[in-house]
Image (spheres, rainbow, N blue to C red):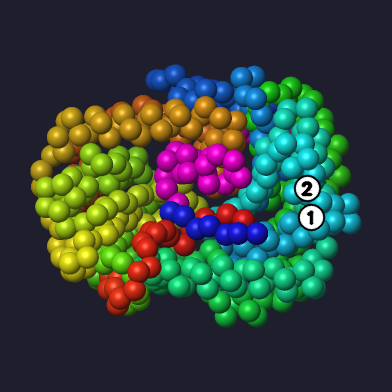
Amino acid sequence: MSTMIRIRSTLFSLLSFLLLALLPNPALVMAEGGPSSPSPSHSAAPSFRFVPQIHHLKNGLTLLTVNDPYSPTLTFQVWYRVGSRNEAKGRTGISHFNEHMMFTGTKKFPHGALDRLISEVGGQNNAFTDYDFTAYFENVAPDKISLPISIEADRMTHLLLKPDQVERERRIVLEERRNDYDDPTQKLVEQVYATAFAVHPYHNPVIGWEKDIQHTSRNDIWRYYRAHYMPNNATVVVVGPLDDATVLRDVKKAFGSIPRGHLIHPRIPVEPPQHHLRMTVVKKPAMLPITMMAFHAPNFKSRDAIPLVVLAQVLSGSRSSLLYQNMIYKNPVAVDAEGDYDPMTHDPGLFYFYAQGLPTTTPKTLRSHLDSVIKTIKTTPVAPSLLALAKKQILTQFVMNQESAFGMGMMFGMMSADRIPQSFLTDYVKNINAVTAADLRRVARKYLVSDNETVGYLFPTGGRVPPSFARPGRIVR
């Protein structure tokens, strides 16, 4: 198994990455047995192609189906509401460790059988761990849906967790962890997050700290598995050419007898407001200097979330963005300047951007240019043409990610895992289009301030390690 860590982008730009990177080849309530459909907003037509049908089984499992008759494949996904934010001190990385173990076998599907069976029917399967959730998926031909149903129902409750397999996966995870530590840009991002979050679990990388991975026992994993892998902590998402009643019947048959578990809701510490500038420095062999700047920002629950999405696009979302234009073209001090903001998180996260400098540029010079662009956006209205382009880019990506069954499954699965209301999608186009230049100036002045800022510098010490910026967020098996 291999592990990749990438930036967790906003929901809709992230889906494009996952469609390429995850695959080997490039709230509604309804009683069990009856579907329901979300009511479209009266002020705007639904901004997504298909309306999901949602069912709740008696054991607490949520089933969400979308009939996409135009898709050549069907995606079957299981989303568990558990990620690294749920981990106890001293056991960081256990969510990702448990994800690895989910592929090591049950009595019904011994080690290696799962991947082999999916491959034999021409399908694709994988999994990923995030701060807020862990998800598993199989993409198969529509007439092969019985296979992923059987696999996922079985490993929800019958995982063997053999001691020798635990040790084998531990070695794999530790190697992944060491690879991340050796990457200077990965180390920088990890330190920025650890510095920005003092008490909240977003402080920890999803892969965990090396010492914790070494000390996590088979019993620790077993208890974690039993505490979180249960039907009342999961959503099954099925998208593709399907009959809703048939899928409901088959899912009830496979999952319905799994007993509801007793969910433990640990107290997640609330990150206190930051009141002064924080800094961290990495000195490692690297090709280029890097400066990263991160600011605490709210999640989807805030009215500022949508303006921040647009601000991120205006600042750093494309080659037409202010940072790219300023630092690569007009005042060439960098080879790259990007960033992002993700409102689709369980708890408030970070609004961040970074620049990879020319070999002769210092990290402090990069910061000076980044600060200059921030100052400009606080004082000067964004040009109407740039604002219109940013909105077009966001909405184009939003539409494009609904063109595949997998993309739609990801969209609805993330929303279910983070309990994001359906209205976020229904009103997304309307709300993006409603953002004004004044909104951008307001949120920039509110959040992009030094007292709310964490700065990270990467000072190259020689060597030829190529840059590969990434944050310690989602991990793909």
Most foreground residue, 431 or 373: 373
Q: Position of residue 161 (x, y in %)?
A: 79, 66
154 or 457: nearer the eye? 457
Q: Residue at x 47, y 39 (%)?
A: 16
- What's the residue at 44%, 28% (across, down)? 399
Inspect this view and state whether residue 252 appears.
Answer: no
Calculate the distance from the C-alpha at mark 1 to the C-alpha at mark 2.
Answer: 6 Å
Answer yes or no: do the residues labelled 1 and 2 have beta carbons within 8 Å? yes
Q: Position of residue 141 (x, y in %)?
A: 72, 30
Q: Residue furthest front?
A: 464
Q: Is residue 339 above or below residue 39?
A: below
Instruction: Reply yes or no: does residue 161 show up in magenta.
Output: no
Location of residue 368 (image quadrant): bottom left
Expressed as whole percent of the image width and height from the top left, the position of residue 268 reads 53, 65
Q: Is residue 34 left or right of residue 192?
A: right
Magenta residues, start to end: 8-33
The quarter of the picture where the C terminus appears is: bottom right
Viewer-nearest residue: 283 or 230: 283
**Mark 1 belongs to which amino acid?**
Gly
Q: Secondary structure at mark 1?
A: loop
Residue at image point 68% right, 51% down: 233
374 versus 465 height, above or below: above
Q: Which mark is residue 116?
A: 2
Residue 18 placed where, x, y %?
A: 52, 44
Q: What residue is shown with label 1? A: 112
Assign a secondary structure to mark 2: helix
Observer-nearest of 346 and 411:
411
For image coordinates 61% across by 45% down, the residue present is 24
Q: Is residue 205 visible?
A: yes
